[in-house]
Amino acid sequence: MDIFKIIGAVGLLLISIGVITKKRRIQDLLYIVGGLCLETYSIYLGDVIFIILQIIFTLAAVYDLVKVQLKKLV
């Protein structure tokens, strides 16, 4: 099996686990790592639409994680 397909499958698994996770910080971390895995796979595929989608998805998860962390500090 191709290493990039394995990375993509891991990303899909992490995001799927994130969907059912109740703790928001862990959910965001799973989304970020899963999104980066799927970003790697989409670059390998060369699919521009999927590349852009994964960038937006990962940045949204990073934004949410930062927002949650800042809320804890205040």
Image (tube, helix red, strand yellow):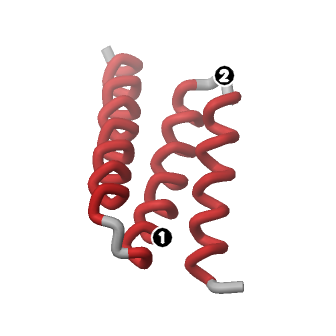
Q: State the separation of the CA atoms marked 2 and 1.
A: 27 Å
Q: Quadrant of the C terminus?
A: top left
Residue type beneath disc 2:
Lys
Q: Position of residue 49 (x, y in %)?
A: 30, 56
Going from N to C along the chain, the mark reached first, 2 or 1, is 2
Asked whether the residues under the numbered discs 2 and 1 touch, taking CB atoms below 8 Å apart as contact, a structural biologist would say: no
User: Is 29 displayed left or right of 73 in the figure?
Assistant: right
Residue at x-position 69% and y-position 28%: 20
From what the image shows, is residue 5 above or below residue 21? Answer: below
**Residue in view at x 59 percent, y 44 percent:** 15
Image position of 15 with respect to 19: above or below: below
- Say which residue label 2 marks: 22
Location of residue 18 in the rendering, given as x and y in whole percent from the top left corner: 62, 37
Q: Amino acid at mark 1?
A: Tyr
The residue carrying pointer 2 sits among few (fewer than 14), some (14 to 19) or many (20 or more) residues within 10 Å by Cα, namely: few
Check the picture and name the quadrant holding the N terminus: bottom right
Give x and y (percent) for residue 63: 30, 35
Mark 1 Cα-neighbour bin, 10 Å: few <14, some 14–19, many ≥20: many
Which residue shows up at 62% across the image and 31% down it? 19
Dividing the picture into quarters, in which one does residue 7 lie?
Answer: bottom right
Using the image, tell me which numbered label, if any, was put on residue 41: 1
Residue placed most toward the observer, 74 or 4: 4
Q: Which marked residue is nearer to the observer: mark 2 or mark 1?
A: 1
- Left or right, residue 39 beside residue 51: right
